[in-house]
Image (spheres, rainbow, N blue to C red):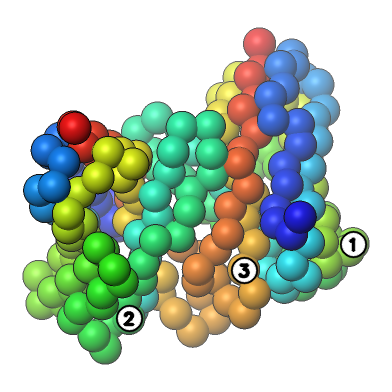
Amino acid sequence: DQQVKQNSPSLSVQEGRISILNCDYTNSMFDYFLWYKKYPAEGPTFLISISSIKDKNEDGRFTVFLNKSAKHLSLHIVPSQPGDSAVYFCAANQGGSNYKLTFGKGTLLTVNP
Amino acid sequence: DAGITQSPRYKITETGRQVTLMCHQTWSHSYMFWYRQDLGHGLRLIYYSAAADITDKGEVPDGYVVSRSKTENFPLTLESATRSQTSVYFCASSEFDVRPQHFGDGTRLSIL
């Protein structure tokens, strides 16, 4: 049973436009969510996170939105740049003494010049 | 340079062999993790460690052994490698708890 789902395996956008990556979760105990970016032959790199007490967190061109009632979060990248082309992973944590991050399968974002 | 280093980057071995993947971090982070990444599964946690001499199982621990005698090192051993353990393995560390985690560049392991 996959608790964190990224239903779009890939997404293609034009440079300068907005990229929206989506993530759904099923475990209502998750209270912290993270996005990681991964380039080929490299490890994932932390991008941005959000606690369940918030519904939005912004860092430069990256904004994460959390809709707890829908168990849905999204990552917005504005404006998209060719260097943003990578696989994006959504991850969730239950908090407390739970040390586990549960990852989605990832979405490959391609930003075309 | 400070960071997290995995070795080797690539490894080919045969079924039944023992193989150890190394992970070294220079931040003195308390928490360390091992993940495997397979097509169609994202990243799955194998083992984690909250401090030296404290380790615990993750989601897919079968066939793996870990140790953490020093804070900076967290080796992962496949005692008798199987083809199903062909994967890309990532080590990660974090300072206070699980979030965020800082990842190494991975070890691509092929078992023939």
Rendering quarter of residue B12: top right
Q: Which mark is residue B94?
A: 3
What is the three-letter code of the residue carrying label 2?
Ser
Q: Is residue A10 above or below residue A76?
A: above
Secondary structure found at label 2: strand
Judge the density around disc 2: few (<14), some (14-19), many (≥20) Cα neighbours within 10 Å.
some
Q: Which mark is residue B69?
A: 1
Q: CA distance from mark 2 to mark 1?
A: 33 Å
Query: Hey, which residue is sitting farthest top in the picture?
Result: B112
Q: Is residue A44 above or below residue B78?
A: below
| Both labels 2 and 1 in a single chain | no
Q: Is residue A77 above or below residue A50?
A: above
Judge the density around disc 3: few (<14), some (14-19), many (≥20) Cα neighbours within 10 Å.
some
On the image, the x and y values in percent for residue B107 come to 65, 33
Q: Nearer the viewer, mark 1 or mark 3?
A: 3
Contact between marks 3 and 2 (CB within 8 A): the answer is: no
Q: Is residue A30 above or below residue A20?
A: below
What is the three-letter code of the residue carrying label 1?
Ser
